Amino acid sequence: MGEFVRLEVADGIGTIQLDRPKVNALNDQGTAELAEAARAAARDDIRAVIIYGGERVFAGGADIGVMAEAGYAEMASRSSRLQGAMDLVAGLGKPVVAAITGYALGGGLELALAADFRVAGESARLGQPEILLGIIPGAGGTQRLPRLVGPAKAKDIVFTGRMVAAAEALEIGLVDRVVPDAEVYQAALDLVRRYATGPAVALRAAKQAIDYGLGVDLATGLEIERVQFAALFGTEDQRAGMRSFLENGPGKATFTGR
């Protein structure tokens, strides 16, 4: 368990908990611990993941005090490590939800963008304020954000550096649900709990087919889907699911994740 990032597991759900007061800023140690937590969350007994910064704030971004006097070579290396940590989160072969309270800014928003779903509290504020510092997002903000909300909305958020309120974030598709602040973690838990007993191999295949397909042409994407689809006929879950459907109707199968 890291000093600033830890992984807690209960009932098949792993929670990657950020804990670096006051705003969970991602320094080098926090980035390394985030990467380690994501690697640990890949294990088979964890069927879904929540990323949570606590009741007050999700993550306020990178540590500006550390970056202020950094040069090109240092930041090229640091941004590579930060992108790598985000990629590990995004690459988890299971559903991942970001539970957003307070601020998700800069690297904090980029971490939330690496999740599959985002649940935000009513007072949450999201943004990429890097332009106000004379730089641009460096951990996925210029790439994952436009893929989620479209290029024009992403450019507005990145070019202005403004903070997006929860209601607007829901309207533009930046978050998927908005709930009272005190209910954010529970809402995220409710969202992923259904996956903890789902067909883990099929869920991984679906996530990979969608994510990989977004980066290729349609024909290649269809081939990715075809291969993933056919491969699932070698799983226990496929046999259990179809047998249950024939005997008991839809939605009643018990899956083992194999």
Image: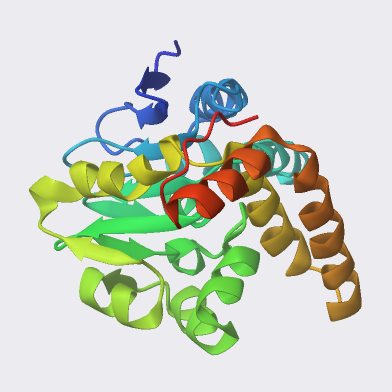
Task: Say which quadrant the N terminus sits in.
Answer: top left
Residue 70 on image: x %, y %: 62, 40
Relative placement, left or right, of 125 versus 147 is: left
Q: Residue furthest top?
A: 1
Residue 161 on image: x %, y %: 42, 72
Name the image quarter holding residue 22. top left
Q: Is residue 34 above or below residue 166?
A: above
Q: Is residue 133 above or below residue 74?
A: below
Residue at the spot 84% in from the left edge and 63% down from the top edge: 226
Residue at the spot 33% in from the left edge and 38% down from the top edge: 52
Residue at the spot 59% in from the left edge and 45% down from the top edge: 243
Residue 200 on image: x %, y %: 58, 38
Q: Residue furthest front?
A: 247
Residue 155 on image: x %, y %: 54, 82
Relative placement, left or right, of 253 versus 20 is: right
Q: Tag count in the figure?
A: 0
Task: Inspect this view and state whether residue 239 appears.
Answer: yes
Relative placement, left or right, of 76 versus 89 is: right
Task: Say which quadrant the C terminus sits in.
Answer: top right
Task: Inspect this view and state whether residue 57 appears.
Answer: no
Observer-nearest of 64 and 125: 125
Residue at the spot 35% in from the left edge and 54% down from the top edge: 104
